[in-house]
Image (tube, grey):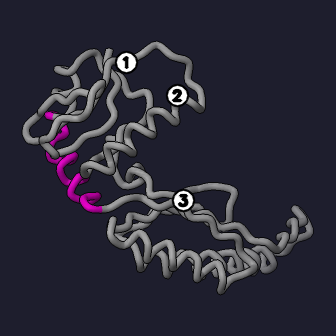
Amino acid sequence: MIELYAITDDPKPPAPPLQAVQSDGLAVLYAEAERREVTSETLWRHEQVVEKLMAERDLLPVRFGTLVPDAHAAAQAVAERRAELAISLDRVRGAVELAVRVETREPEAAPAARAESGRDYMSAKARRVAKVRLVHDPLALAARESVLHPGPELLRAAYLVDRDAVDDFVALVRRLQETHSELDVLCTGPWPPYSFAGESS
């Protein structure tokens, strides 16, 4: 069995123990699968490998634990989706993912499940949406694309940002934090573009 790490169209071979198998202009980067317990450490090791690859080339990251029998099976899987993967790779070319989470510092009033009127509920929801837009709208304009993810936070989002625009994006996050002191704004990354890689991730 082999474990997949990324798909790329960069022809240079990866550093061992990674290997590459070519498939119609694309390459699958993989390593021999190891028997190991799934822990935060093994997840982080996989992530470190993908991040190192990301620093060297454009790629579609493959999520931890994606196993196939051998290199031939990996090449065949890529060949079956070649057009879709090429489009996804062009989508993320020259870009990385930045993650932003926003929480409010002001405790939100707990809804009274039965006493709250429909008007109160809609007003609270409108206020929440307005807070999200204070941060999300300017960040979305500064990014190529954005994706909102579900979560307990006020906002959990991923932004596809050009590599040479990362510093400007982070500076914008800082300005938004300074402007909206009632919010906690956390930006992490750059990460491999998992949120924008389609099913390859």
**Location of residue 151 by image quarter:** bottom right
Q: Which residues are magenta?
A: 79-94
Indicate the amino acid at tag 1.
Ala
In the image, residue 87 sits, relative to residue 35, either above or below, namely below
Compute the Cα span from label 1 to label 3.
29 Å
Q: Secondary structure at mark 3?
A: strand
Q: Residues within 10 Å of mark 2 (few under 14, many from 20)?
A: few
Q: Residue 35: x, y in percent?
A: 46, 13
Vertical placement of 131 versus 46: above or below? below
> For this view, does 62 lie left or right of residue 59?
right
Please name the residue shown 43% across and 27% down the image. Answer: 65
Residue 47's image quarter?
Answer: top left
* Residue indicated by mark 2: 42
Residue 27's spot in the image, x, y percent?
17, 37
Q: Which residue is mark 1?
A: 33
SS label for mark 1: loop
